[in-house]
Amino acid sequence: MTTTFRSVNPARPDDVVGEFPAHTADDVDAAVVRAAEAQRAWARVPVPTRAEVVAAAGAVLAERKQELADLVAREAGKVLVEAGGDVQEAIDMAAFVAGQGRAAMGETVPSELGDKLCWTTRQPVGVVGLITPWNFPVAIPSWKVFPALLAGNGIVIKPSEHAPACCEAFVAACAEAGLPEGLVQVVHGAAEPAAALAVHPGVGAVSFTGSVATGRKVAAAAMESGPRVLSLELGGKNAMVVRPDADLDLALDGAIFGAFGTSGQRCTSTSRLIVHPDVAEELVGRIVERAEALRLGDPRDPTVDVGPVITAAAAERIAGMVEAAVAEGATVATGGKPVTVAGCEGGAFFAPTVLTGVRPDHRIAREEVFGPVLAVMEVADLDEAIDVVNGVEYGLSAAVYTRDISTALRAVERIDTGIVYVNAPTIGAEIPLPFGGTKHTGNGFREAGTRGIEQFSQIKTVYVDYSGRLQKAQIDTHPIDTGAGAAPGPREEDA
Ligand code: NAD
């Protein structure tokens, strides 16, 4: 008998958003078989026609934006404006990917030989397994589903157990747009179905977004079970560097939005502020003042600035990290603990927190918090500040605030992250450019942009020789002189 689990509203845990089946490895197996059957026909559909289905899905999402945003706010705890942004990202991704349906998908190069053509095409991988986190519950499925569909794949998606309703609503919108029956399968639950999907022999590519700890397990299991395309988009420990010549009003807005937007639960959230001592007191004082003025509450109330964190367990984990920081010598300038919000009793709220006196070797300066906590470090020298940015195992996003072009460009060049902002916060990526990180944040693939299709397709290189005779490429016509007579080479008439 299939057991079930409940998805609840993190602001009001007695509000049950939905009850979902906890799928098993057998269920995953059946889903892969169904997706594979549908994929055989989908692979023969011309790419521009596949793109039309993606565009139609975008149109359905746009029609339902309000309703979906409300669901995102209710299930994932994002304030309404950010919940709308989550859905908008999917609408924009549909438009971008649909456009790619009529764009170049390969390369053509001149051949070394006459009467010969060389080019590449992109082929589907078959069935792709998508494992997604809860924090962009519509956007991240769209970053994966739309390019995977355009590339001609069948899909089995396992959304986070904390946001299953959002994924169901997203897939329902795609189905309404004319997606072939069976092509996109959703399986629910936590580790069991996800782990089964990652190692399933019928899955040609696994695309995982989530924490480093889970990503490592997925990577080890997936590669053990056979070669496949494996893309990992993992956590971040993003830093904002503020130089003494920075526009402090701008840096203040960037720090508040970067650190406390989405309650600090974006992979790109600003987690470290590396500020020059000359401006530290003024900037940190103003950040604390603004943090204390933020209104916490039900994210579906449009006057609320900061919603809950995803679960009470997450709030406890964040409190533990703050306590450990204090034990290591940091000072809580504001916040630092879970709070009770009137009208949302039992909700998982955590006060926007600023920690001062943090050193780069403190745990709070090295590990992802994934909550509304900003760790402040004072560093005078630019090269040293960049070393602090780079001195963590993550490499997703970074920001530098300065009015000096040389400082900005030095930082852009030397910071080792997949995304760098100048005079803008660490959050705010745009769809047409690649998204992803270096080091333990990712394994080199990028989502979004024209590269977003790479993890969902295989390149096929094609050579067509219409000379009517055996022509040998350079690899066989430039032998070294071994002194043992001529190596078999081109016939005289070919030379
Ligand atoms: P998580 O790692 O807890 O879960 C991610 C997914 O993995 C979920 O669907 C979960 O059910 C599944 N899972 C759990 N155990 C598994 C196992 N043993 N094998 C396979 N899958 C398993 O992450 P989360 O809390 O949902 O999301 C937050 C994390 O995601 C943060 O670390 C954040 O930085 C990261 N994130 C990264 C990006 C990016 O693009 N780099 C984007 C968003 C979130």
Image: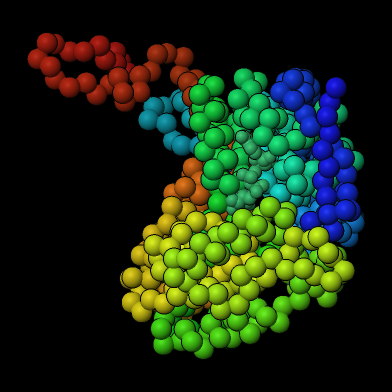
Q: 190 and 479: which one is in front?
A: 190
Q: Residue at x 55, y 40 (%)?
A: 215
Residue 426: horizontal and vertical position, in percent? 56, 66
Q: Is residue 338 visible?
A: yes
Q: Is residue 188 above or below residue 332?
A: above
Of 75 and 396, nearer the camera is 75
Question: Which residue is found at the position 82% from the left and 38% from the top?
Answer: 5
Residue at 48% of width from left, 44% of height from top?
444
Q: Is residue 446 visible?
A: no
- Is residue 301 depicted above or below 131 in this figure? below
Position of 418 with respect to 25 (left or right) is left
Residue 130 is drawn in which quadrant? top right
* Rendering coords of residue 437 (x, y %): 50, 52
Quarter of the rendering containing residue 158: top right
Q: Splitting the image into four quadrants, where does ligand 1 fall?
A: top right
Q: Nearer the viewer, residue 145 or 332?
A: 332
Residue at image point 59% right, 86% down: 286
Q: Residue furthest left?
A: 483
Q: Could you tell me residue 166's position as x and y percent?
A: 81, 48
